[in-house]
Amino acid sequence: MKRLRNGRPHPKNETGFILIGSSFALLIFISFFALVADLGRIFVTKAELQNTADAAALAGVVDVERGLDFVLEKALEFGSAHWVADSNIAIEAQDVQTGNFDFETSQFQPGLEPANGVEVRARRVNGSPSGPLSLTFARMFGKTTSNVQGRALAVLDRHVVGVRGKNRLIPYSVIDFVVDEDGDGAFDIGKTINIHPRNDAPGNFGFLDLDGGSNDIPELRRYIEGGYDQDFILPPGGSVPVSGSTGIDGNSLLNSFQQIIGEVVFLPVHDRVDYEGSNALFNVISILAVRIQEVRLTGAMNHRSISVEIVSFASSVLVVDPNAPVNNSVAKPRLVA
């Protein structure tokens, strides 16, 4: 090999070393780019699958007390509505389980009754209907696919203490022994009752001043037709005194009640009324879900009533607290895993 007087390699050899080094560096860069690109695709797919599982579990748990068939129908419907990595996700029946979630231990036992939880898996794996996730750049290294999945567990939480925002809570209270005739602490689900305007406090017949304002007829109409538009929260296991509304003409609210016939709304439940007239305070202890059946607010007082069916209803607007007692009428569907 020819050398210069100072002993350094000939410049042509330096050029060869540079080309070899550059090629090696380029190979490392391409490999790194391939890794980053496909890892990013895997992470995005994982997030999308998790969103799919979350939506399917929340949709299914609303019907968990009706049985597995109803849960599967909802979960499969919501799952198939999602696209992940440019492919429709097919959730199989084996990907959905119902069971009992113990709120004290935070443990879920599939298949255990009474069922209050739904677990859903959304999968892009070998053997699943949607197949594994296809990789792009990793193919040059012999890696063509990756198994990715998401898992979600949704429960019906019945430790309800109130509602948030515009929430279908109407300003009309019912006394507890009318909706819990045997006094066992559970509402009489499925029973249709007539809520008569009770004269527990002269001048007050059950209409509430939820926001502590003037509570005029237009405001009552707005709350009846669209629900109370603020938060209403009870202390866990406690009560909230709410002022009654005096001088309310039932006929002036008849049209508003007729607009919500057939709908499910929330009613405050009170156990007593303190004081009288404009000073009356309804001691609200709980929230109840009912379906409005028929409304009669005109004529003789003993002929007036609101006919409702007591129902079990789940809604995301409900507020829960682990220290609150169980409410068999209302529940909040929420994710715990």
Image: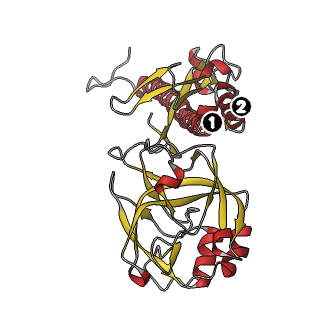
Where is residue 266 drawn, in percent x and y? 56, 58
Residue 108: percent from left, percent from top: 44, 25
Whether residues under marks 2 and 1 lie with C-beta atoms below 8 angstroms apart, the answer is yes
Identity of the residue drawn at 50% across and 36% down: 155
Q: Is residue 177 above or below residue 241?
A: above
Q: Nearer the viewer, mark 2 or mark 1?
A: 1
As helix, strand or loop, the secondary structure at mark 2 comes to: helix
Q: Quadrant of the N terminus?
A: top left
Instruction: Point out the tag, 2 or 1, that comes first from the N-terminus.
Output: 1
Q: Which residue is mark 2?
A: 73
Q: How is the image coloured?
A: secondary structure
Give whichever of 113, 173 is nearer the camera: 173
Instruction: Say which amino acid is labelled 1.
Output: Asp
Tell me which corner region of the image, top left, top right, bottom left or bottom right, holds residue 147.
Answer: top right
Task: Tell me the distance, in whole angstroms, between the alpha carbons under discs 2 and 1.
Answer: 10 Å
Residue at 32% over, 56% down: 238
Q: Is residue 54 above or below residue 97?
A: below
**Residue that lies at the very extreme toward the left in this rendered image:** 6
* Residue 62 image-quadrant placement: top right
Residue 199, percent across and down?
51, 72
How many numbered discs?
2
- Front residue (pair 66, 61): 66
The answer to whether residue 304 is seen in the rendering is: no
- Residue 318 horizontal side relative to residue 301, left or right: left
Q: Residue at x 63, y 77 (%)?
A: 221
Residue denoted by label 1: 63
Name the image quarter holding residue 98.
top right
